[in-house]
Amino acid sequence: MKFTGRQKTIAFFIVLGVCLGAAITLNIGWFILHWRQGVLMFVGFVGFLAIILGLILNTGFLIREIRRNEHHDSFINAVTHELKTPITSIRLYLETLQQRDVDEKHRQEFYRLMLDDADRLRGTVEQVLKAGELGYKHFVKRSAQVDFGSLVSDCVELARTRHNLRPEALHWIGSANGPAINVQGDPDELRTAIANILDNAIKYSGGKVDVSVEIDTPTRDLVALRVRDRGVGIPRHELKRVFKRFYRASSRSVSHVKGTGLGLFIVRGIARAHGGRVFAESAGEAHGTTVTLELPRSAA
């Protein structure tokens, strides 16, 4: 197995940290054996310890920066692909329409495909712009009373249409006859958060999409949206990391999935701006994932 330059750098700093720890241990032992030499030795030891501590903190900072740069590179590659692919496709269809005599049936099919590619392109740009907004302190720009159940139902139907799913592939378990569950917030931003959660669940479902969407009221003051898939799952040590900007799961089973690593980061920012939270649960790889969005309820 070949190591990249960054992996070698991380390994170097880890070895350096171990060596520094060993040096500290030896110095402590030496100090214990020669403690009678007085206060100057103690002052020297404290100064040496401060230098070592600074080196350790600097090493940790360098490792974090290296990982952050790796995530940035991965994001740039993903965005480049997400932008280049639909542009290339649209250009190909336009060249075909320009250079060949295409019958009406195929012409309409080309128009539909180009519109799909344009929607994909717009979605990528909107995600990047939204992530840029969330990089600063974010507030709800437009607040209104929102029927949360109706909003989720609309998002489920839109996701089913966008991904060409059969009705049984996306289960909506919301109660149609129960009282309306209201939240206070920006309908457009809440719609964006729900759509991102649904898209993630569908994309990471693997070969067979089987996603259930449920609304629950765990307390009088909270409403919870739970989106459960039976897909590739998330390793437990990555359950919190997937909400960071640019972060994508490292499992080989998801390496082929297209994305920018911004979807769940945007969901977290919107949830926090509305006084709620979002978290993921998974028993591990190949055991599916449940993403829960909790928001405070408001009076009808």
Image: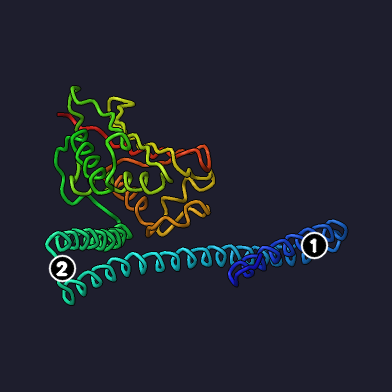
The three-letter amino acid code for the residue at tag 1 is: Asn
User: SS of the residue at dot 2?
Assistant: loop
Residue at left offset 84%, top offset 61%: 30
Q: Residue 27's mark?
A: 1
Residue 78 in sight: yes
Q: Which of 11 and 110 is in front in this view?
A: 110
Q: Residue 110's spot in the image, x, y percent?
A: 19, 63
Residue 22 shown left or right of residue 277 in the figure? right
Residue at left offset 86%, top offset 59%: 36
Q: Which of marks 1 and 2 is nearer the N terminus?
A: 1
User: SS of the residue at dot 1?
Assistant: helix
Residue at left offset 16%, top offset 45%: 143
Looking at the image, the residue that sits furthest to the bottom is: 99
Location of the N terminus by quadrant is: bottom right
Q: How far separated are the C-alphas under marks 1 and 2?
A: 82 Å
Q: Residue 102's mark?
A: 2
